[in-house]
Each structure stands twice: as C-alpha cells, then as structure tokens.
Amino acid sequence: MTEAMRRLRKFELDPVRGFLPSEDPLRKLPPGFEPWEELSAAMPSLLLAGRARDQLDQLDQLDPGGLRTEPELWRAFLLVSLLANSYIMGEEEQAAVLPRALAVPLSQLAGRLGVAPVFNYAAIVLRNWSRVDPTEPVELGNLVPLRSFLGGVDEGWFLMSMTAIEAKGSPVASALLDVSSAISATDHDAVEKGLQVISTCLVEMTETLARLSEKCDPYVFYHRVRPILDAWREPGVVYDGVDGRPQMWIAASTAECALVQALDATYSIRHSGHGDAFLRSMRPYMPVGHRRFIEHLEAGPSVREYVVRSRSVSLRQAYNENIDLLSTFRRRHMEISVRYVAQQARKADTTYGTSGTDFIRLLHTLRQETTNHLI
C-alpha cells in the first residue's frame, strides 16, 4: 500500500472512489438477519398500505453483535435505520416511541459505527447503491438503490443522483491531500495541478446535479419523498430500551455530505453564525473518518493564504476557478431547493413554507460566503 493510500485509508477514504466505499455495498446480510432484509424490502408496499407500524410492532429483537466487517455493519445500519424511520415518519402522526426491537439494535450499530442513531446520508447515499452492469462506472444510468422507502422512479433517481455526484467528486479526496502536502513543500506546480483536478470534479458534479429533474418531479419529491426524510418534530422520539427521554435527530440530509465541507475546509471558507453552527451540527451524522478528514484539512495550511503569498498569476487563476465553480455548485443546489421545496410549499400552503424559505436563505448565505473568498 502506498503512502497516499495509507493517508486516505485512515480517513475511511478510497483512492479511486473517494467518500464512497472501495467495494460496492453489500447486498445481503449473513443468515440470521432475514427479518430485517425482508421487512426493508417490503417497506414500499407496507407504507402504501399503511401497515408499516403494524408489521414492525411484531418484529423480534435481533442482536447485531455477530456482525464484524464494515460492509456488514453499514448494511445492517441501512436496513434498521430505514425500518426505524419508516416507523417514526411513515404515518400522518409522528411516532412518539421507537419499539425496543428497532431502538436497541439501531443504537448498538450507531455506536459501533460512531454515528448518530438515525437514518443518515452515509447510509442512504454512500452505502445504498448497486451497479446494473458491474463492469461500468458508478454513474447515473448504471445505478439503482438497494433499498428505498416508497420506491418509484422519482425517489430512486433522487437518491442515485446524490450517489453519482459523490462518484464524480471521488478524485477530490486525494487532490485535497496532495494540495496540502504541496503547500508544505512549497511546490507551486503540484498545488496548481491539484486545483485543476478539483475544478474538473466540480464541473462534473454540477452537471450531474442538474440532471435531477430528468426523472425526479418536484411535486412528487415534495409530497411523497421528502416527508419521510424530514427532521423529527418536537418533542422527539423515545428509544425504548435505550433512553426514556425523547431524542431529536435529523434524518438523512444532503447537508451531511462531507465532500463539500472538505472543500470549505481546504479553502478556509469560514461560514458565519447560523450557517457555521448548522454545518458543524451535521458532522455527527457522518462516518468518523470523514469527520476527521474535515478536521485534518481545517488544521492544515490555508490554500488561500498560500496563493496570495505566491503571487503566481496562474495559481491565483486556478484557485479562483475552484471558488467560482464551488459557488456555482451551491447556486445550482439553491435553485433546486427553491424549485423542489420552497415553491412546492407555497403551492401546498403548508407550514413547510417558512422552514423552506429559511433554508433557502441559508443556502444563499453559504454561496455568498464562498464567493467572498475569491482573490
């Protein structure tokens, strides 16, 4: 194993796939966990019939202690967290108590993985895909989700769009470490080369994000996909057998994407007030290694300061291109959020309008703070 690979491995990153797992996600747990496999596979039908809670209330508690490998743990966490979120958010009224048969193994798995005990972006996006043709790349048109809540084209396309964006950004992880090392070595050419790699990734990430509307309709997303992924409402949910006090968690959110926060860390983009607090509050939902990677980059040399000191015109151009492209990616994300959340909320005349508007304002601020880092 090369030194570069060792550096990435300690952050749970892959030299080729970046934040995605080095091997395609596990498709089935070992014998003994059939109830989790079968119920999660049947969840779209159970939610459609309004029988998800009835069936999950009959689930016997399984012990995940025998699971050993990381793929097994993430597969189990995906299934159990999906079942738990289906129980909590799958009906008109949010459940007040998560049954012991789900709460205990979910908490155990979360503890072993070092993440919050709730359905997250790492499970549904990074560890929830399969390639139609294993010889072809991880990209839209060759990806299908292993599990979903309601099923259907819109939900599947939304989830796989996020996975495809991660795949397009996969070279970023190595490039960020290369840039940091090059700054320490005062190697202008290597810094510029790393920034050029990142620029290419940002272009492809933005192009992939723009394809969301091809098969994911805003109305369907807002009224069918988004509700079950929404943040829990007060007073929260009691985890039976774990803690008698209600817990408050945010289910899977794109704000949990470590890739974008890693870019912010490298460029020393410091977000203000609520924006900084919000992004940092998303880190406990990320895999431990990914959190440490962001912290490692934050503690490392400032790319912006290095570029300013270098007085190199080409280096400044490469840096500014990175910032401009990251700002463009954030703008595209904001535009999609307006179309898929804020506009749909206004049409529906629901309380989501206020939260949607606040989130759009936050995204606008994050983008503006990114643009402010141009040299």
Image: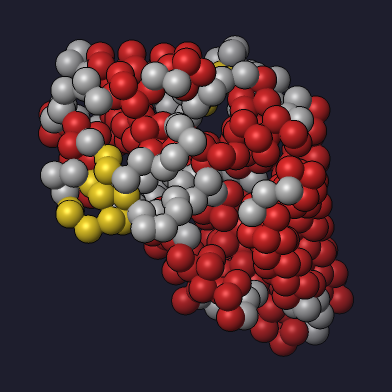
Quadrant in the picture for the C terminus: bottom right
Q: Is residue 293 visible?
A: no
Numbered disc total: 0
**Residue 66 rendering spot, x and y as whole percentages:** 13, 29
Q: Is residue 188 left or right of residue 297?
A: right
Q: Is residue 178 above or below residue 9?
A: below
Between 130 and 173, which is closer to the camera in this rendering?
Answer: 130
Q: Is residue 249 above or below residue 305?
A: above
**Residue 37 rendering spot, x and y as whole percentages:** 32, 17
**Residue 74 rendering spot, x and y as whole percentages:** 34, 35
Q: Quadrant of residue 177?
A: bottom right
Between 147 and 99, which is closer to the camera in this rendering?
Answer: 99
Q: Quadrant of residue 127?
A: top left
Which residue occupies 36% across, 58% down? 235
Which residue occupies 34% across, 17% down? 39
**Residue 319 rendering spot, x and y as whole percentages:** 77, 69
Q: Is residue 107 left or right of residue 197?
A: left
Between 190 and 75, which is closer to the camera in this rendering?
Answer: 75
Which residue occupies 64% across, 54% down? 351
Q: Is residue 366 above or below residue 216?
A: below
Quadrant in the picture for the N terminus: top left
Which residue occupies 67% across, 61% down? 354
